């Protein structure tokens, strides 16, 4: 005699075989309630993850804006003191590239690197864990490459401006050292 027959009595095996675990599960109200709760939890988690993705949209815009930066062209505009045209909501307007422009760009790029570094490696959104490491790895080259271009450009630009300034000073000194014979030459010196 088996353990099942001892516990359930004679004919117990037939009762077990006619009522399968799947059939019991389908008829169980607790199972249905848990299934509905789980479905709602998963749906809410994915809705929360969709909302959380809006947190990352500024980074997408940052990368797009950085890819449009024309840093070598900014050097030419600065050295030649030529105004470029920038388009905004109101239309095109002249943009003069100054040292303040470069300082603002450096500050902006440094803050972008800090914002990317400040992103958490993992973000918990309900029952979903978002791994942000690959996102950080994809975003970081954008401000880093722009900063590298600026770090290469600014010393070269400063050296050229310094050489132009020294040449102008030497030219002015040589004109001032030359003796003026006529009034026009004297007025030209001044």
Image (cartoon, rainbow, N blue to C red):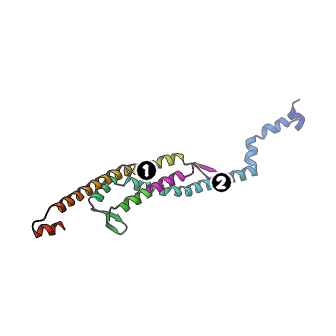
Determine if residue 40 is in view: yes
Residue in view at x 21 percent, y 61 percent: 172
Q: Which residue is mark 2?
A: 41
Q: Could you say where residue 79 lies in the image, as x and y percent from the top left?
A: 28, 58
Numbered tag placed on residue 132 in the rendering: none
Which of the marked residues, 2 or 1, is nearer the chain's N terminus? Answer: 2
Residue in view at x 50 percent, y 54 percent: 114
As drawn, is 181 to the left or to the right of 9? Answer: left
- Compared with residue 172, is residue 27 higher up or lower down, i.e. above or below? above
Q: Could you say where residue 109 lies in the image, as x and y percent from the top left?
A: 44, 55
Rendering quarter of residue 89: bottom left
Q: Could you say where residue 111 lies in the image, as x and y percent from the top left?
A: 48, 56
The residue lying furthest to the top in this view is 1
- Compared with residue 20, is residue 28 higher up or lower down, i.e. above or below? below
- Closer to us: mark 2 or mark 1? 1
Determine if residue 9 is in view: no
Q: Which residue is mark 1?
A: 142
Q: Confirm whether the magenta stretch covers residue 143.
A: no
Magenta segment: 108-129
Q: Could you say where residue 64 lies in the image, as x and y percent from the top left?
A: 41, 54
Q: Confirm whether the magenta stretch covers residue 117.
A: yes
Number of marks: 2
In the rendered view of the protein, which quadrant contains the N terminus? top right
145 and 65: which is toward the camera: 145
24 and 111: which is toward the camera: 111
Crowding near pointer 2: few (<14 within 10 Å), some, many (20+)? Answer: some
Q: Secondary structure at mark 1?
A: helix
Q: Secondary structure at mark 2?
A: helix
Tell me, yes or no, whether the two marked residues, 2 and 1, touch with CB atoms within 8 Å: no
């Amino acid at each position: 005699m088996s353990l099942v027959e001892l516990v359930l009595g004679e004919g117990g095996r037939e009762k077990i075989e006619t009522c399968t675990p799947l059939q019991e599960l389908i008829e169980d109200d607790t199972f249905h309630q848990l299934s509905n709760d789980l479905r709602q939890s998963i749906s809410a988690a994915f809705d929360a993850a969709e909302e959380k993705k809006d947190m990352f949209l500024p980074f997408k815009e940052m990368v797009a804006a950085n890819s449009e930066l024309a840093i070598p062209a900014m050097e030419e505009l600065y050295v030649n003191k030529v105004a470029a045209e920038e388009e905004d909501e109101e239309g095109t307007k002249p943009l003069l590239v100054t040292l303040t422009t470069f300082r603002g760009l450096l500050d902006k790029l440094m803050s972008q690197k800090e914002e990317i570094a400040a992103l958490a490696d993992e973000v918990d959104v309900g029952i979903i864990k978002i791994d942000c490491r690959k996102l950080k790895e994809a975003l970081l080259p954008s401000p880093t490459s722009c900063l590298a271009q600026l770090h290469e450009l600014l010393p070269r630009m400063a050296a050229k401006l310094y050489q132009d300034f020294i040449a102008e000073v030497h030219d002015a000194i040589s004109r001032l050292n030359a003796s003026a014979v006529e009034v026009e030459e004297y007025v030209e010196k001044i």
